[in-house]
Image (tube, rainbow, N blue to C red):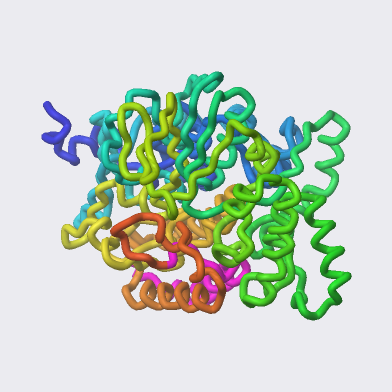
Amino acid sequence: MTTASIDPRELDETNGVLDVLVVGGGFAGLYQLDQLRSRGFSVKVVEAGDSLGGIWYWNCYPGARTDSTGQIYQYSREDLWKDWSYDELYPSWAGVRDYFAYVDRKLDLSRDIIFSTRVTSADFDGERNQWTVRTDTGRMLRARSVVICTGFGAKPHIPRINGLNSFAGESHHTALWPQDGLDMAGKRVGIIGTGSSGVQVTQEAAADAEQITIFQRTPNLALPMRQQQLTGQLKEKLKENLPERFAQRRRSFAGFDMDFIPKSVFEVSDEERADTYERMWATGGFELWLANYQDILLDERANRIMYDFWRNKVRQRVTDPVKAEKLAPMDPPHPFGTKRPSLEQNFYDVVNQENVDIVDVNEDPIERITPAGVQTKSGLREFDILVFATGFDANRGGITSIDIRGTNDQLLSHKWSERLDTFMGLTTAGFPNLMFVYGPQSPAGFCNGPTCAEVQGEIVVDFLTHVRDGGYQRFETSEDAEQSWTAHVEEVFHMSLFPRAKSWYHGANIPGKPSQMLNYSGGLPSYFDHWEENVAAGYKAFTLS
């Protein structure tokens, strides 16, 4: 009997119907598994990778690491953090994988995870109020509810370039990197893109590649990481105030252990502001982005002061004036912080090397890929390796790559093709008993990953518990609720400087797709205030039956 001919009723009798099926085995999916299991739900996770980690399974390119410090890049449970320490202040992909393995051992998660299996479709049965989920291995599962935890970076974006498949050397997107690595020593490497992965690969490749050429559309306004190797004594010191750091993580704008200074840039003297910025620059990390003065992302004049500080710092390190103008132009390419900054270790030092070149594709556009390399307007550049550091169809891509069919035989990808509507990035009308974590129109793009996994994850777990304990078989968001939330997301977005940058925050990096704010920019406290209003009003955004 083929998979397509299996009657779902046979599945009920042989395999049973799960209370919840979770798609994705990263921070969000594992939180759902552990918490739902503890509340008595029958639950399974389907994970496309061969092991745990979500994006940290796929993103194993050279230099891949977190942009959160390790002490907050973990679950906040004391029974997990008290016996765990990373070896670096900013953990590498390998360090994060070690953490997932540790959590798995502690919580015995893998027994309820189906690995090496990608969900391809999900169909809602309105008579039974259940989902039928199919996978690329032919396995079929049924569940009363489905929670999608594919993350905001689950669908890599590779730009449409003529001759893309003709290249004779090795070419890889950073999110589809070979699991056994790739030797770049003595090779001519072309890196297309200057997001976080482009910066990180450049730093690593510059150590032993023969030649590196960076193809840049927009400069990355990167901040210093200030990486440290952690000794046993320092590891213990970093745990001393972890409970407070975790508490601050939950109440801050972006889910980090820092928050904005409750003053305007213009409420302090030039000397005080300069001292603050120098201190933050020396500390490193995201303080200059997420612990800056409160009007940094709202007021263009305040933002320009910050940009000029950043620009001058970078130009002190990039000695070639041509490269300096490309990487840190005198006038900002966009307001500082309206694209997610990267954290760099020595990027602005290695670009000084003679074997590192930068091509501004606005001035010298890529025309085609050839077997030998990249043909631009000015000529052919030959390479042994091409790296596509070109980002993702963020927030929505991982979800819409699954054929999810709700009521009235409607595909989710079709519903979202022209305009995306959700209620708080959690649910969408016409698709009952379906929820998202890290979904579009949630705070995911601005948020520390484990923070969103926990605090947004709590919403999902608590709501599913309410549905079950109330004896309900079905929940669905109203169209009015999701349209109201979309309007609010757009309103907050346009109150800020974020519209001034073409970024993945609002889908501007994917040609042919509507540009719409895909991340809630009002901050975590406001986001959860909206949820509490919904709860206090008897879950008014939902129809329960």
Q: Residue furthest front?
A: 378
Q: Residue at x 61, y 47 (%)?
A: 323
The stretch in magenta equals 517-545
Q: Nearer the viewer, residue 151 or 225?
A: 225
Residue 336 image-quadrant placement: bottom right
**Which x, y percent locates residue 236?**
84, 36
Q: Identify whether 472 is placed above or below 283.
A: below
Residue 415 image-quadrant placement: bottom left
Q: Identify whether 312 is placed above or below 86.
A: below
Q: Nearer the viewer, residue 82 or 417?
A: 417
Q: Residue at x 45, y 74 (%)?
A: 490
Note whether residue 486 is visible.
Answer: yes
Residue 388 relative to residue 208: left or right: left
Q: Nearer the viewer, residue 82 or 471?
A: 82
Note whether residue 181 is visible.
Answer: no
Residue 117 falls inside the magenta stretch: no
**Which x, y percent locates residue 163?**
27, 36
**Which x, y percent locates residue 204?**
61, 30
Residue 538 falls inside the magenta stretch: yes
Q: How many marks?
A: 0
Residue 287 relative to residue 145: left or right: right
Q: Quadrant of the N terminus?
A: top left
**Which x, y percent locates residue 342?**
61, 49
Residue 486 relative to residue 244: left or right: left
Q: Residue at x 56, y 24 (%)?
A: 209
Q: Quadrant of the C terminus?
A: bottom left
